[in-house]
Structures are given as structure tokens and as C-alpha cells.
Amino acid sequence: MILFRLKRTIKLGVKSLTRHMLRSVLTMLGMVFGVGAVVAMLAVGEGASYESQERIKRLGSLKIIINSVKLSADEESSDKTNFTAIYGLKYTDAEIIQSTLPQADVILRMRSVRKDVFYRNRQMNSNIISTVPWYPGVTNQKLEKGRFFTSIDMRSKLPVCVIGAAVEKRLFPCEESLRKQVVFEGNAFSVIGVLESAGSESDPEETKELTDVNSAILIPLTTSLERFGDIRMERKTGSFTREQVELHRIIVKVKRVEDVVKASDVISGVLAKTHTSKDYEIIVPLEMLEEIRRSARMFSMVLGMIAAISLLVGGIGIMNIMLASVTERTREIGIRRALGAKKRDIIIQFLSETMVLSLVGGVLGLGLGIGMPMLIEMFTDMKIIFTAWSLILSFSISAVVGLVFGLYPAWRAAGMDPIEALRHE
Amino acid sequence: MTIIEISQLHKTYSLAKGAIQVNALAGIDLQLERGEYIAIMGPSGSGKSTLLNVLGCLDRPTQGRYLLDGADVAQLDDNALSDVRSKKLGFIFQSYNLLPQLTVLENIEVPLYYQGRSEKESRIKALELAEAVGLADRIRHKPTELSGGQQQRVAVARALVNDPVLILADEPTGNLDSKTGLEILDIMDRLHSGGKTLVVVTHDDGIAGRAKRIIQLRDGLIESDTRN
């Protein structure tokens, strides 16, 4: 019965609205754009947040990265007579971490030194990364061809190397690189593998690692230690620095996401004990991920708020028109009251008109809010993600707006004195 | 059987924030039997409209008793008065007061809608009445597509659709030329002979001549009550 009545009430509302088609459509537009803006903004925000999360995930949410940091001149604990700056992570640090962190899956040690590399008459300045055999597994780095060095290479301290894609391009532009010998620091290393090109991402945190890998040469840590030692010398115009760094980077990979924060606390505790000065930094991608999630949520919320303001404006537009409509239809109200309509009936009548306006506007707005971002996605490389809750949210907001902004005009209509209303011209 | 029983009915309006009191009705006593056809007359300001509004349950008297169809309606609240209007009264206005967005048939149905009758039932009843006032071929038209006389006939049909115990008409021929006015008066005569109770407010002697009882008001009081 009530449902039946509702259907007739809505029919009545639609009839009254279609009487002033243009006006109704214009009124509805406010709602259409409001809901459309909310849906579109949330989709864009969601897409942006997804993209940045993906970027951090690629860095590895299970990893903890510890870098050596060079101290500023005044806190340097250098051996002045030797002109050598000694700082950074030690081999023993890696061992201590390994023994205090049973939940750590693998621990990756890395050293990097810039050197000039030669192949026949070709030359390039490359980053020599000394590392361990499980490097590809930890960093998700794939090989284009050949193989990575193994524990056997490592133990026998063999002069083998794996080169980055850019190195291969530069030194071996039109010949096979595998089994060739590249020379640096007077040592010949035979190429056993080539890394896959690591894309052209432009994330600042990643660039260091990625561009390094592309134009890097990877050699076993043991080989490096035996042939080059720990001391790195750099000559610049007018100056000359000697540094002694054992490891530039340690990457700890844990098995479960829940262990990341715990492990990073342990590591920072251990390193604080063994290092007198803070010559290292600990980077936890997971924390960055959470940070990004937080800021993405903020971003979405701000976007949503801005869009919600347009919804509010749309709602005010509807209320404005409904108030005008109530005044204009004063006589109709009087007639209906004389024919037996209760105040409640008048309220329902006007409220249902507002609801029809805002809900139809809401549906059209959903269409617009889904269509526009899809078009944008088609023509740009922006990522757009629609979530069910954002669609439901914006549609229910339109319903609430209709209800809230419809109540006052409806209440005004119902409050009219029937006799006065009948006399109204 | 008595349809209306009014005793010592007062209606006082306060103007200028209570500084001036206007007695629109100053103690009216009136009895109306079922099937009566009465005309209420009087100069403007005599209280005709106020009396009609009170009789029509659109307004409450300040003081006095009003029994409509045996029930005291003098001090009912807004909701209850709406109910009384919806179930017991039929209105015919000078300016027809049809709803412009609705068709003839839908206009006739309006009182039934507020009684909560079903769509089907309303339709049948409305069709019956459209036929009775000779507009069966116009049911899909909008009021603006009809002549004044036709519009008033729609209004009459609407006033009858809820089978009211009392039909109130306020200058029903005031906006019509004399020929179409006569048509409406003929319909009202037919209603009277069909047993309906009619109250017409007018200052047209021609109409009053058709009523069986004429009440003259002056300054909120009944000046004369004559039967033809």
C-alpha cells in the first residue's frame, strides 16, 4: 500500500517537474556536476595513490635498506695523517645483523665504486657494484642473457662480471658481450651475464638504484675485496680524497610484512651500539608505503571535499528553485489542501519532487563521473580507479542532499494557510 | 436529518497585532437539513466568505459550536480538518481552481488520492463523473484546453467524486458568461433534485432565485432567513 502510494507520488512529482522541463534540467545540472565531480575526483585520487603504492612496492615492501652515509667534515673520524675518511657499514655489521635477526631471509651486501672500464678501444665510466650471488633474487632484477655469479664464483674469487644493459650497449654495440673481457683497474673480468634493462622510472628514490644497475658492472664481493681492497680514491680538480668504506649498502629482506618494522628496530639498535657516529641511514620502504597511503588518503579526501562543495552548491540550487516553485504554486497548495490534503501530503509531494531531481541528477552524475575519467584515461596515461564505495558514497550524498535541501521548501509549502493560499493569484 | 448545526458562531480577527479586533462573524445560529439548497447573500464585508470557510472546515471559529453530519468539528486540529474536507465536503470555486499540470480525469481524481483510494477505483469513479457532467470526450485534455464552462464542469465533477455530505460553492458562475453560467446552475439544480445538500455564496439574485432558502448576512449576523 505504502509502496503503491509512493509510486503515485513519484509519478505526480515527475509530472510537475516535466511541466517546466528546462528549469528542472538546469536545476538538475548542479547535481549532475556535483556527483560527477565527486566520482571523478575520487577515481583520480584512488588512481594516483595506487600508482605511487605500486612504485614503492616495486622497491620492495619486505626490504630494509641500510646505506652508508659520509659524515660532514667536522664530525669525520678520519685518520688525518693518512688523509683517509673511514666511515660506513662494516662487514661485521652484516654478520651481526644476520645473527641477531633469525627472521631475516637474506642479507645482501653491496659496495659500489666508480671506475673507468675498458673494452678494446672503447671506454666508459661505470659503477662497479661488488655484491653477493643472491642479488637478483632480492632486487627482482632479471637477466637478459647469460647467468649471475654463483657461490662457487664467490668462493673461488673468480674475475667474472655481470654487466648492465647500458654498459653492453656502450662497450659492445655490435658484438656478443658474453665471454669477453672488460678491464678496469688493471684487472680483466670476463662477462658472464647481462642484466635486463630496468625501465625508465623517474622516482627519485629508485633512480639511484635503477640507473646504477643499467650502467653498472656487478662483480663478486670477495673478488673485489681481494683485488681492490676497501680504499676508494677519488681525484677531483685541486683535491684528492681517500675513503675507506667496507660496504655501501646492506639490504635485509624479511619473510613477512609484519616483521619489517620489528626488524628495522632491531637493526637500528644493533648499529647504534657498534657505530660511534651515525654514518649510516636506514630506509624502510614499507614505512614509505604507509606514508604514501596516508598522504594518498588525505589527497583523496581533499579532492572529495572540493567536489562535495560543488554538491553543496547543487543542493542550494535545488532548494532555491524549489522555494521559487513553492511560491509559484501557492494556489495549487491551497487547492490541494481544500480537497483534503494533509500537511504531511504536501510535504511528501514537494520532498519527492526534490528527491526525483537530485536522484536523477545523481544517476546522470554517476554516468558523467565514470565517463569523463575513462575518456581522460583513454587519451592520457593517468591511472583511474573506481571503487564501489566511492560510487555508493556519491550517490547517497545526492540522496541526502535532496532530502536536506528539500525539507525546508516542503515545510514552507505545508505551513501555508489554506485560505490565504487559495486567494493567492 | 440535520447536516449542519451551528450555534453562536463567532470569528474574530486581530489586526495590527491585536490592537484592532474585527468581528467577521458575530454569533451565527443556523440549521441545515439534508437535501437543502441554500444561498448565502450579503454585501462585501458581511462575513459570507468567513462563514463559507468555517463551513468548509478551512478555518476554525473563535467561539461557538459547529456540528457537521453529527460530529463536532469546531476545534479539530489541522489533520482532522483535512480528513473532514477529504471525506465529507466538496468545493466549487469561482475561478475553477483546477490543477494545470493534470488532465481532466486526473483533476477529478485528486480528492480520492488524498483518501488513499486505489488508482483503479479512482479512475472508474472519475470516469463516471466526467460522463455525468458531459465531458467524457475530454478526459485527456488539460484544463487550459477547455472553455470556462467546461472547466467549471470539471470542478463540479471533482466536488462530487468523494460523495460529500455537503457541497460548498463560492460564486460558481462569477467567471462565466450568462449562458454557460446557466449550464452550471442547471447542473446544480440536478444535484439538488438528486438529494445533495448545497450551500452557494453569491450576490447574484438569479442564482439565489434557484435556491430554496436564502440567508442574508450583514455585519457578521444573519439579517434574514427566507424560504422560496
Image (cartoon, coloured by chain):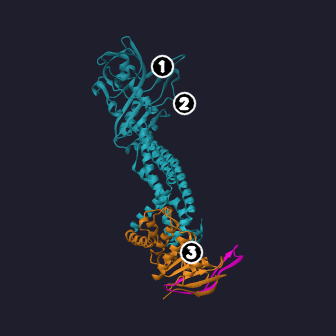
Chain colours: A cyan, B orange
Measure the alpha-carbon separation of dots 3 and 1. 109 Å
Residue of label 1? A234
Residue located farthest toward the top when viewing the structure as drawn? A121
Q: Please name the residue that numbered disc 2 is placed on.
A: A75
Same-chain status of marks 2 and 1: yes
Q: Is disc 1 placed on a helix, strand or loop?
A: strand
* Start-end of magenta stretch: B8-37
Mark 2 or 3, closer to the camera: 3
Residue type pointed to by label 1: Glu
Letter of the chain that mark 2 sits on in the rendering: A
Q: Indicate the position of residue B104 as horizontal and vertical percent values.
A: 45, 66
**For the point 29% across and 19% down, which residue is it?**
A178
- Circle 2 packing at 10 Å, graded few (<14), some (14-19), many (20+), is few
Which is closer to the viewer, label 3 or label 1? 3
Please state which of residues A40 and B134 is positioned toward the viewer in this rendering.
B134
The quarter of the picture where residue B31 lies is bottom right
Q: Numbered disc 3: what chain?
A: B
Instruction: Assess whether residue B10 is covered by the magenta stretch.
Output: yes
Amino acid type, residue under disc 2 in the picture: Glu
Residue A79, given in percent of the width and then of the height, sits at 51, 24
Q: Mark 1 lies on which chain?
A: A
- Up the image or down, A274 lies above or below B103; here it is above
Q: Residue B170 carries which label?
A: 3
- Residue A98 visible in rendering: yes
Dot 2 and dot 1 residues touching (CB under 8 Å): no
